[in-house]
Amino acid sequence: MRTFIALDINSEVNEIANETISKLMRMGFKASWVKPENMHLTLFFLGDVKEALVETLANRLQKRLAGFPSFSFDVSGFGYFRFKNRPRVFFLKVVQNKALQTLYLEMRSEMKKLRMSFEDQGNFVPHITLGRVKFSPEKWESLVEGITTPKITVPVDSVTIYSSTLTPAGPIYKWLYRIKFEGGLMKNEQ
């Protein structure tokens, strides 16, 4: 099962994301845009993982994160990853903070104990993906340099493990486990 671990975002971030996507579309960019219901902050992309291992991971993370203090992160600004002088991915910037970095490292440590493989370049760059760029107009850099977004604070009191099913219409995400910092593990029985 194709799996990832993420932090959920609030409706304010969704709104700003959709406004930013609309601006980019009006500027002539074409991309595989992320649907509003699929917006999140990815902590780890795990790839294909057996269901039993996902359950083991959820239980281990529940123990590891019990008592982890609730925190918040700020979403502020627009950015992109490049490939060969072209934008490859558009995103909303997430301001890195100590709590977010600590959460990432705690979870990373637990996954390493389970000998799980995951995408990890050693440099966690938190962001909220808006779309994977397929076409960008000429002078694209001057178009995007004026994009600004307000600062939005997102509260965090849990992490969520999702499955991702790829379809021709785009990925379908289903939450599998929600791990609350106050203790407790919710399993999606659907």
Image (cartoon, rainbow, N blue to C red):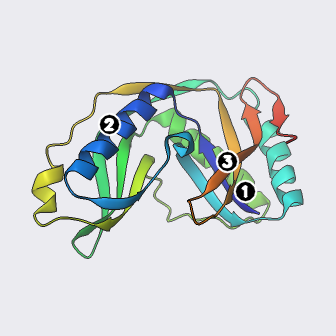
Check disc 2 and report its element: helix, strand or loop: helix
Q: Residue furthest front?
A: 169
Of the residues shown, which amino acid type is indicated by label 2? Glu
- Per the model, the C-alpha gap separating discs 3 and 1 is 6 Å
Q: Which residue is mark 3?
A: 107
Task: Judge left or right: residue 36 versus residue 52.
Answer: left
Task: Judge left or right: residue 125 versus residue 120.
Answer: left
Which quadrant does the N terminus fall into? Answer: bottom right
Q: Which mark is residue 19?
A: 2
Which quadrant does the C terminus fall into? Answer: top right
- Per the model, the C-alpha gap separating discs 2 and 1 is 36 Å
Residue visible at 70% across and 58% down in the picture: 3
Check disc 1 and report its element: helix, strand or loop: helix
> 10 Å neighbourhood of mark 3: few (<14), some, or many (≥20)?
some
Residue visible at 51% across and 28% down in the picture: 10
Q: Quadrant of residue 111?
A: bottom right
Task: Judge left or right: residue 23 versus residue 97.
Answer: left
Of the residues shown, which amino acid type is indicated by label 3? Met
Q: Which residue is mark 1?
A: 111
